[in-house]
Amino acid sequence: MPHTVSIPDVPYLRIATEEAFAPKELFDEYRALIEKGSIDDPGFMASWGSALSNRRGGSPVVDRLMDLGEQRIAHMDRAGIARQIIALTAPGTQIFPSDAAASMARLANDILHDACTTYPDRFTGLTAVAPQNPSFSVEEIRRGIDLGFKGIIVNSHTQHRYLDDPEFFPLLEAAEALDQPIYIHPNTPSKGLIEPMVDLGLHAAIFGFGVEVGLHVLRMIVSGVFDRFPKLKIVIGHLGEALPYWIYRLDYAYTFTQNGRYDNLPQLELTPSEYLRRNVWITTSGMAHEPAIMYAREVLGAERVLYAMDYPYQYDLNEVVIHDNLPLSVAEKTELYQTNAERLFKLV
Amino acid sequence: MPHTVSIPDVPYLRIATEEAFAPKELFDEYRALIEKGSIDDPGFMASWGSALSNRRGGSPVVDRLMDLGEQRIAHMDRAGIARQIIALTAPGTQIFPSDAAASMARLANDILHDACTTYPDRFTGLTAVAPQNPSFSVEEIRRGIDLGFKGIIVNSHTQHRYLDDPEFFPLLEAAEALDQPIYIHPNTPSKGLIEPMVDLGLHAAIFGFGVEVGLHVLRMIVSGVFDRFPKLKIVIGHLGEALPYWIYRLDYAYTFTQNGRYDNLPQLELTPSEYLRRNVWITTSGMAHEPAIMYAREVLGAERVLYAMDYPYQYDLNEVVIHDNLPLSVAEKTELYQTNAERLFKLV
């Protein structure tokens, strides 16, 4: 049982970088959408439909998502987590119409700001936006900085569109100009991607999340987003959503598409792997697996790999122990757990 | 340039295990389908539509696919390849109506058998089947054994259905009973999976192939195929289509689907990783990347990792050198290049 694990004191701060919350109002709105039955998103229905509408007496994860108080702090204490970087859970605002999405983002940011003010030594926030409302999002990124937030959360596709869509360029431009890393957190795969996953429950953490976010980042790379916004910083979880494993093949097979068949593909300035090593940081959420962490550090660079727990979805103290026991020096563990996050999110 | 690379003599046989061919008649039939414009498969149209219909003066890959003679032998000699394990290229017969698929499989097997008879020391064949015609496929697997073939090729989805579909169980039953490994080679993703890949050319080797085959194997695992056919042997390329990278998360997140929400999911006898380590072998096709090969050997087991070149799609002598230079002993390289293949495909 996770809670019998004993977490040692260590000479570094454990900063967990992919941690989630949700206002009660978000679930209320999700329930309203589910009851209307009008959502054009099979992944949303599969992941939240039964969790919210058939709920009997509360789900621990839903309850923990709504808590930004003493319970969360107690869980952090028990796990030895010094600080959580907290973001609005998927799909956040991105499933709503534009105006409703903006209102929800504003509300979520206000609630998260209150909690960060109450626990300034324990919580750091990321700014919730509404990508389907670019002008609002640009303003909200600025407001988020005023509120002390250190980056932006985008829960992958927005109504089946990805950040390579020029509609979203004002958001990317603001993120780059204001040096706010964008955490692209999984959403269930978009409707053109999910069909042969969802009948067998493969659309979520076991497979679909990684496909969705890996595709998202590749779309940004091959469409030239990182030539247009060369200083844009993207963070992805789950040890890079398998892109580090594919890194050699990405470069090799990318050349196969440069044969004139795709006149919508620009000539890129760099190879795919060069963008991964320049514009992308990865976290260990859900991947407390020593060989994979060591591999990702080797191929992407140790300075690009950050610790994450994925609270409350994966609150497992054994995984903290696995990270503590990695075959790394204290200096390297400090980098993984603490200083990479401090530098990327400008925490100190 | 690849051809200036010098390939050293080595104390092991280089057996390449994911090598492709195609009869001229296959391309003739593909062209007829493309001209009719009636194919319900966006991946097929994207990958073969322009390659075949706009062809001017021959494509080197198409020409090399059709050659099972002196040119192929010369290329093998230049690359130091002792033996190719040869299979009908994707999507093979799987796009045709049932009877046409059976005829094409039979023709392909006759042609490949002739070549293997001409070059018995250099070529080994896999049996082409027509999964959409299960009774034919069972008979053809038996005939393939008589022809000296050592396994079966399935080019992933068959008209958007996967091998977890009970329609295909007679094929799996025969493969298990006759101890014929099934090589699940990529096809472009099925129509429910491909939409946000295809506009940017991400549906093929750079990303879509891996998603398609990774999903295929996971569908077989979670639906219980390997409990029904516990001795079934599956081979997949590209270092396991990222499944080895996900191996920890597959087991962890699989438990999330065991909450009663999926009444079509059986109670499995093993964890996902246990099936990968019992029923699945992987090859290095397209993944001549030292860290990834070493990682895959570590997590899956060295005895499950086989060399492949992916001729003629990826005829690159540098990649042979990369394999020769892996930080492995001669005994370990012999296992990777030779004896794992000899054992799995019963070559000696």
Image (cartoon, coloured by chain):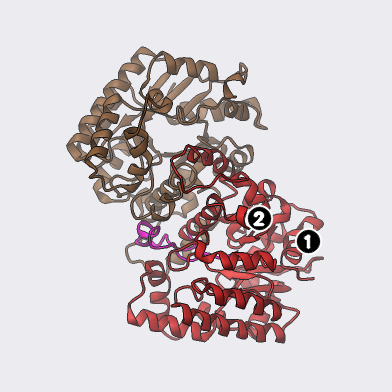
Chain colours: A red, B brown
Q: Are labels 2 and 1 on one chain? A: yes
Q: Position of residue B150 (x, y in %)?
A: 37, 27
Depth-wise, is mark 2 or mark 1 nearer the camera?
A: 2
A39 to B270, vertically: above or below: below
Chain bearing mark 1? A
Report if residue A28 is visible in the image.
yes
Under tag 2, what secondary structure? loop
Residue for badge 2: A230
Give the residue type that dot 1 points to.
Thr
> Is residue A279 left or right of B28 when viewed as pictured?
right
Quadrant holding the N terminus of chain A: bottom right
Q: How many marks?
A: 2
Which residue is at a point 78% across and 55% down the rendered structure image? A332
Instruction: Report the magenta residues as a range.
Output: A184-206
A128 to A296, vertically: above or below: below
Whichever of callouts 2 and 1 sits on the residue coming sooner in the sequence is 2
Residue for badge 1: A334
Q: Residues within 10 Å of mark 2 (few under 14, many from 20)?
A: few
B334 within the magenta span: no
Q: Position of residue A175 (x, y in %)?
A: 64, 67
B228 to B147, vertically: above or below: below
Closer-to-camera residue (B153/A4) = B153
Q: Quadrant of residue A82?
A: bottom right
Q: Position of residue B80 (x, y in %)?
A: 54, 19
Which residue is at a point 66% across and 68% down the rendered structure image? A17
